[in-house]
Image: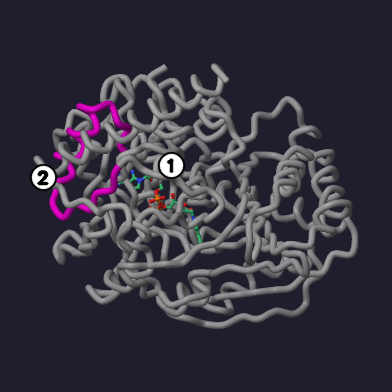
Amino acid sequence: MLATTLLALLLSASANAILDRRTAIGDCLTAGSVPQVLPGSSAYNLAIKPFNLRIPFTPAAVVQPKTVDQVQAAVACGAKLGIPVSPKGGGHSYASHGLGGEDGHLMVDMKYFTSVKVDSSTQIAAIGTGARLGNIAQSLYSQGQRAFSHGTCPGVGVAGHVVGGGYGYISHTHGLALDNLVEATVVLANSTVVTASTTSNPDLFWAIRGAGASFGIITEYKFQTFAAPMGNTVFSYTINPSSASQAASIHKALQDYANSTSMPTEMNMRLFVSPGSFNLEGVYYGSQSAFKSAVQPLLTKLGISYGQVQTMDWIAGLSNYAYMSLSTPIDYDVHETFFSKSLMTVSITDAGFTAFWNYWQSTARGVNRDWYLIIDLHGGPTSAISKVADNATSYAHRNALLKYEFYDRVDSGSYPSNGFSFLNGWVNSMQNAMPTTNFGMYINYADTSLTMAQAHSQYWLGHYPMLAQIKKAYDPKQVFSNPQAITST
Ligand SMILES: Cc1cc2nc3c(=O)[nH]c(=O)nc-3n(C[C@H](O)[C@H](O)[C@H](O)COP(=O)(O)OP(=O)(O)OC[C@H]3O[C@@H](n4cnc5c(N)ncnc54)[C@H](O)[C@@H]3O)c2cc1C
């Protein structure tokens, strides 16, 4: 009886503390004239609905600023009251990090920062961090047929995409999205606004290109654009391996191809594996005849004789792999329910290939959900990503030949509690076969099964200690945090 009464008192004290915090942050935001959206409204429900419906969180407050001053005022309130602050861009973090990755954050939804403007003399594009990739691509194209390197999904927010890397169908040719970045405007933990570039706060600029979610709220990016390539070759070949050893030899052939000078810089390629098929697909930035002579040795090795090869301009190529319209509304409302993992591999041994594809044969093929695995030919001697020095940015995977996204989703209902072992087991199969290798992982495919220490070591590898030092200088009180963010230790 006494225990029950005590528990009830404790629960009510903690509920009161939460209410007090909500009132305090609400008052502070009101005093700073920061536009809030309040629980109960449809705007609030949409703002906090994560892309990954598996992991919802309840923020302490949600604001939707329209000016940099309002972003500064919001950060000042969070810092003053000890409430962690999390910017949300497109809301596509696999771990719902835009919501903070846990309850109780002040969420700063940047949805109104959508401006895209190309300077016609420098061809540098200034882009607001609430903009989404599909709208940006179209706007850049309409301003003199310009483009920059980025990923495929039109709904992904430029903000989170760039701070973690930003890989897409032109990255082998033009690098990651963050390699195209020349400047960012950042609201820091002390609520001041600074410019980050190679000449202004270069340490911050280094940190935000790979780990930017931990260092401030970026309000604007500036990218050096390039002329959108036209007359591109878009290709797709289906392969049907009948055994684990055949699948392993395809995988090895792709690793060898990425690691050779036979893969032209203009070639962008991935293997898409789903329960039903293997598809080798991508874009070559050149003519069909140049593509065919560049790809033929690989096709011969893989025993592929037939595929689809088409010529498309830049926008048609983006649409081809978008699987939806490039135009997205400001109140974008698309969601999935899933668990995802990643790997970045430098050199897989024969034992690694064998274990990985034995797992596919014994386990993955029997999983009756809508899963897929994408293996991108990411780095290597001809890749623009690997040509950037390892220590030039905090992105830590310059030497990874292949990049993997494992994605297991359900079409309706909740993700099964016994589902996690499937992808964890697949990644472990390679890890166990190569026990002395510390495999990298990609923060843009944030994996909720990693502890903070594992996330630090696998997302940022040897760059973590430098990131922790820079965090100490710019955000010693961890105003910007989430369960996998950089800390100052
Ligand atoms: C359908 C889909 C397709 C994808 N395709 C690709 C792809 O082709 N290539 C690829 O590389 N990735 C891809 N991704 C992954 C994507 O790049 C990441 O999920 C990315 O983090 C999403 O950014 P966001 O702004 O939409 O997400 P959010 O959840 O809003 O933010 C992600 C992280 O960035 C931080 N952040 C947001 N805004 C700011 C800001 N203004 N300043 C500082 N930090 C900020 C957040 O706090 C959070 O930690 C895809 C994801 C999905 C869901």
Q: Quadrant of residue 295?
A: bottom right
Residue topped by disc 1: 388
Any magenta on residue 72? yes
Residue at image point 33% right, 72% down: 329
Which quarter of the rendered picture does the N terminus lie within? top right
Precedes in sequence: disc 2 or disc 1 = 2
Any magenta on residue 300? no
Q: Quadrant of residue 447?
A: top right
Rendered position, 327 above or below 103: below
Residue at image point 43% right, 77% down: 325
Q: Amino acid at mark 2?
A: Asp
Measured as percent of width and height from the top left, residue 168 is found at: 49, 59
Q: CA distance from mark 2 to mark 1?
A: 35 Å
Which colour assignment does the render follow? one colour
Which structural element holds mark 2? helix
Q: Amino acid at mark 1?
A: Val
Measured as percent of width and height from the top left, residue 160 is found at: 38, 49
Measured as percent of width and height from the top left, residue 360 is found at: 82, 53
Q: Is mark 2 within 8 Å of ligand 1?
A: no
> For residue 30, which numbered disc appears in the image?
none
Q: Is residue 206 visible?
A: no
Measured as percent of width and height from the top left, residue 34 is found at: 15, 47
Residue at image point 51% right, 45% down: 95
Residue topped by disc 2: 69
Residue nearest the observer in this picture, 95 or 135 = 95
Which structural element holds mark 1? loop
Instruction: Categorize mark 1 by other alpha carbons within 10 Å: few (<14), some (14-19), many (20+).
Output: some
Residue at image point 85% right, 45% down: 354
Rendered position, 255 above or below 367: above
